[in-house]
Image: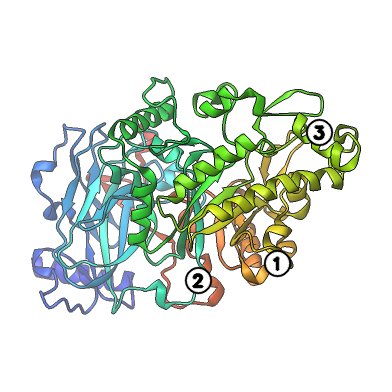
Amino acid sequence: MKRMISGILICILCLLFSPVEFVHTEAADIPSESGKNTGEILISDLARLVDTKFINEKDTNLWKTIPYQTENFSGIMIGDGGGPNPVPITIRLGVKGLYRVFLGIYSGYSIPKINVRLSRDISCQTIGLSDIKLKDNVYERGAHIYEIHWKEADLSGQDIILEGADDPNIRPSALAYIRLEPVSEIQNRDGKAFLPLTVTNDGHGIFSGPLHSCPDDLLKPFEIIPEESCMRILLWGNGCADNCNYPTKVGNFYHNAGRNYRNTWMQKWSMNMELWKKKGWNSIKVVRDYTKKRNWEFQVYIRMEAFNAQFPFDQQEHSNFFISHPEYHCFDRFGQRVGRLSYAHEEVRKHMLNLIREIAEFEPDGICLCFIRGVPLVLYEPVMVEGFKKKYGMDPRELEEFDTRWTSYQGEIITSFVRNVKHILKSGQRLSVIVPGNEFDCKRWGLDVSSWVKDCIVDDVFPVGQSFDHRDVHRDNPEHLDFTYFSQLEGRENIRLIPMLYPWDTFRENYSKWRGIMQSFIDQGADSYGVWDAVSDEIFPFVGDLGYGVHGTAGYPEIGFRRIKVLSVQGFRIDRYHMFESI
């Protein structure tokens, strides 16, 4: 009888996933040690493959076994108990060979997400869906398992390890099944034609996650990035201007590390920063070494004007240099102090050059100057006014704000600084700049990108799709990126031109439009494509493959999901007479 039921189940699975053969894996069904497989493997009874000491219905820090029935197969899920200090649990795979791994995740309510890794992975990845991809309401989520492609890997000698969710705002999910699809070889991105992806991480918010126990905990967010993605360049932030996230002698380590805050985000950030400060861990070195293992280019990016902020953000950005030198602050045309340091002062330029020199000593592949946040860098300081009067015989405060004589004069100051940055970098280190996405917005802030490119001062230019509102605040605006302007600059052939977009308003409201805009830049000859703050399980799956689509690379696994209808959970019918009706 048992063999007959098993045979029926295999037939059903074959029909469900036709034309590939599926096997309901029990102990006797695991492939032989030769590693040869005739079909895919579906592991649905996970309870048989874990240590029972980690299963406890009453201990919320341990795990639950959850029987379920779908239209075509049954199984036992492993569910997160929902406790504050979850204990990892290992699922013994017992297979050998190369596989494409798919995970069936059940949440019953929240967006389905689990933290999972293989034995040899550095840390867990958060695997799941986002509101962007998953339009199902909570009622639909309760009636479906969501199968998601995870990765391709050699599973020989490896198990799958689950960790509890680290997001206190969502209810726990469960791993319902594991589907293994044999592959003849692992997709090697270096052997495929693709356009590389550049992403940023400001080196700030990444410290606000779960409390760290060792330096490698900082790297967990990067583990969501699969090897087969287009990811190749990381722009890692040193912090905010001279507010640094590493042991610095030139700037200052974040001043509020270790302080208590009511806000959960700030509290976790503060506690992690205190730990890093106390231990003397160097985040630049940790991330640099990690990128070498991942074969990524590593540039450190610096927000050139993120020295200080007013309440309530003074809790985060507080530059000792800024506070100590009010005489170097920027001033508007009416003499009102502005929360910026003026690069018209030699002392400010020298201070930042020393900071850049310090960072360059850690041997990143490049230094990236970020000019899209905190502009302007110079205004109507006395040294600027007097210098302009001497050159033009008139007071710049009497001119229109964007008079070309005035913006060009501002540009001379900033260009001189950028040129000096180039001179202090080590041989082979690249100098890149992140700038507004069109000619007018560059020139209005004294950013003479055309001269930087023509004179071979910079190696990489990242124009960003944004606009400035009437308060001079940057706003997401991908249509404001004038790729043609940058592509026609004299000296264009000597740089990498990498358009960058935010995954914000347009991305969330009209993803296909966003992707189409980025595709158009690629079609016009971009050397890479960039996405701001893309290291997120809600963003990266929608940007990591774009470089493949351009060249029509075959075989790249589609980042998607499919729904498996659930009939019952824990022995109770769920497709009708739903549990939501009783809670």
Q: Is residue 477 above or below residue 8?
A: above
Cα–Cα span, label 1 and label 2: 22 Å
Q: Quadrant of the rendered structure where residue 453 is?
A: bottom right
Marker disc for residue 548: 2
Image-quadrant location for residue 73: bottom left
- Disc on the earlier residue, 3 or 2: 3
On screen, residue 136 above or below 87: below
Q: Nearer the viewer, residue 55 or 502?
A: 502
Return the residue at label 3: 385
Q: Is residue 77 left or right of residue 553?
A: left
Mark nearer the N terminus (3 vs 1): 3
x, y percentage for residue 85? 23, 33
* Mark 2 residue type: Tyr
Around disc 2, counting alpha carbons within 10 Å, would you say few (fewer than 14), some (14 to 19), or many (20 or more)?
many
Q: Position of residue 370 (x, y in %)?
A: 59, 47
Q: Secondary structure at mark 2?
A: helix
The C terminus - image quarter: top left
Q: Are marks 3 and 1 in contact (CB under 8 Å)?
A: no
Residue 568, visible in the rendered structure: yes
Disc 1 vs disc 2: Cβ atoms closer than 8 Å? no
Front-most of residues 552 and 426: 426
Label 3's element? Answer: helix
Does residue 525 appear anywhere in the picture?
Answer: no
Q: Please state if 334 lies on the left or on the right of 160 as rendered.
A: right
Distance from Cα at disc 3 to Cα at disc 1: 34 Å
**Which residue has dot 1 on it?**
487
Q: Earlier in the sequence, mark 1 or mark 2?
A: 1
In this orientation, which residue lies closer to the viewer: 159 or 79?
159
Nearest to the eye among marks 1 and 2: give it.
1
